[in-house]
Image: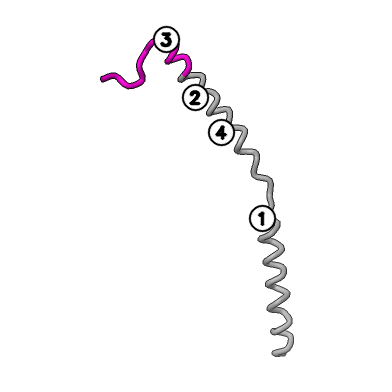
Amino acid sequence: MAVLAWLLIPLFAAVGAAIWAGWAQRNRTSGDVAELAGYARFRDAMEKAASSGTDAVRQ
């Protein structure tokens, strides 16, 4: 029975490593589109504020 336990430990480690590797290689680009669109809106708003002559920081 002890031999079976020593054989199962590397098997579980290999399965865990395969699961982690699959999770680490997942496609994470879906959030980038929303962030870039938000940055584009922010940049447009800053350009409009600068062109209208209003100061963002008034002293």
Instruction: State the residue at coordinates (47%, 14%).
Output: 48
Secondary structure of the residue carrying tag 1 is helix
Mark 2: give few (<14), some (14-19) or many (20+) Cα within 10 Å.
Answer: few
**Residue 20 screen position, x and y as percent:** 66, 61
Instruction: State the residue at coordinates (51%, 19%).
Output: 44
Amino acid type at image mark 4: Glu
- Dots 2 and 4: beta carbons under 8 Å? no
Question: Is 30 left or right of 56, judged from the image as shown?
Answer: right
**Residue 16 screen position, x and y as percent:** 67, 67
- The earlier-in-sequence mark between 2 and 4 is 4
Viewer-nearest of discs 2 and 3:
3
**Residue 35 screen position, x and y as percent:** 56, 33
Question: Is 17 left or right of 40, judged from the image as shown?
Answer: right
Q: Which residue is mark 3?
A: 52
- The earlier-in-sequence mark between 2 and 3 is 2
Q: Is residue 41 above or below residue 9?
A: above
- Dots 1 and 3: beta carbons under 8 Å? no
As measured in the structure, the alpha-carbon distance from the residue carrying label 1 to the one carrying label 3 is 48 Å
Q: Which residue is mark 2?
A: 42
Amino acid type at image mark 3: Ser
Mark 3: give few (<14), some (14-19) or many (20+) Cα within 10 Å.
Answer: few
Q: Which residues are magenta?
A: 47-59
Instruction: State the residue at coordinates (68%, 46%).
Output: 27
Give the numbered dot on residue 35.
4
Q: Which residue is mark 1?
A: 23
Please tell me in which quadrant of the rendered image residue 12 appears.
Answer: bottom right
